[in-house]
Amino acid sequence: MSAATLPFATRQRLARQLAGDDQPPAEPAALIVPADQIGLIASHWPGISEALWLRAGGSDAAHLTEAMQHAIPRLKLDFTPFRIIEIGAGCGYRSVALAHAFPGATIASVEPFPANARLHALNTLPWRRIIGLRTAITAHPTRFTAIADPATGIPALRPDSEGGIGSMSLSDLHRLLGWDHADLLLIDQRVCPDLDDPDITAGFAGTRLVALRRTGEDTETIIRHDVPSAAHGHPRPVFDLGGPPMKMARQNIAPDAWAFFPIGDTGFRLHPNPHGQQPPRLILHITLAGERQLETQLRVNHETANPVRFRITVSCETGIIATGETILPANSQQMVTLDLPPINAPATVEFSTEMAHAQSNGFAWAEVLGSGIR
């Protein structure tokens, strides 16, 4: 038998021996908890810089192993999520796994049960991209008390007007985060008891994948594409602070704080320079694939502003492929759509603003809102 035909595990072991390291690869959650140990244990998972905490003598070690080894592959994503909401995050292990797997993503990690609050905080606070929230998700504001299910011992929520656990709707959660949608939504029904209520499912709009765990069923096997068909058409943002680091160039933008700043995650102000000066330009680098449309909402939101000219130009290495221009008066807005040719190539989207006439640019609050590729 040649070395090339040895089983992978055997070749891996031989390589470690040759390197002077014959220790087996670590599977921390399965190995680091002695049977007689009590209290909180710090686990150092390979590839994760921060410690992950668990309670000795319980099921935390198994949950940690499941989250780090199996949870992400079972989602079978065909896209890269940038905004993730996990409702029922437990001790935060899967939120950490998601943050590790998708370094451009922001994760809202929702866990209401006080019994998990300490570990959830210990595990998620070191990750700046994980936002921890202590709430249940319901169709209408409700208060709960945490109880143990008599049949399974699993924590459950019981409605109680004097209870210490509050709730909010999924739409309110989006507003709290400053998001208009989430790409990936993971839901444990215990923490979202009104799952079939239309006021909850309305919050699915724009979500690419909803992964559900029904009460009493295995966490990872109940994966369903429950998203309304209209939600799949949600445009991919061009300017997205919640997404990966953007390649962005600014030209002729005044240094004043009011000249350029983000509005939410997917919009911005691009204040026009005084008449006669070069217009400010914001240039974003994107990648096009197939026939697409660029949609954007333009707005001049001050009632005493002079008219502003907006210009949008989409270019690739062969030159300009689409351009649009419009003039908006004070206190007005307009949706603009540009049809893009069927190309598969890097491209740039350039936004510029200028005064339409020889008039003052005071109060010309020119804004570009929610630009996206559909």
Image (tube, rainbow, N blue to C red):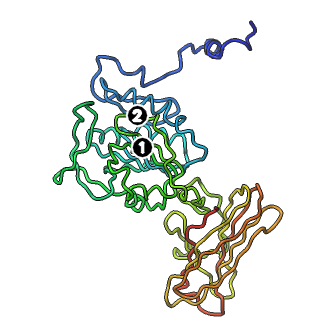
- Residue 126 is marked as 1
Q: Quadrant of residue 111?
A: top left
In x, y percent, where is residue 247?
65, 58
Q: Contact, CB < 8 Å: mark 2 with mark 1?
A: no
In the image, residue 317 sits, relative to residue 31, either above or below, namely below
Question: Can see residue 129?
Answer: no
In x, y percent, where is residue 336?
63, 74
Sequence-wise, the earlier of marks 2 and 1 is 2
Residue drawn at 51 percent across, 91 percent down: 304
Please tell me whether mark 2 sits on a helix, a strand or a loop: strand
Q: Residue furthest top?
A: 1
Q: Residue furthest right?
A: 318
- Decide if residue 251 is on the left or right side of residue 244: right
**Residue for badge 2:** 52
Q: Nearer the viewer, residue 165 or 56?
A: 165
* Label 2: how many Cα within 10 Å (few below 14, some 14–19, many 20+): many
Residue drawn at 41 percent across, 32 percent down: 218
Q: Quadrant of residue 197?
A: bottom left
- Decide if residue 368 is on the left or right side of residue 112: right
Q: Nearer the viewer, residue 122 or 350?
A: 350
Q: Nearer the viewer, residue 88 or 217?
A: 217
* Label 1: how many Cα within 10 Å (few below 14, some 14–19, many 20+): few
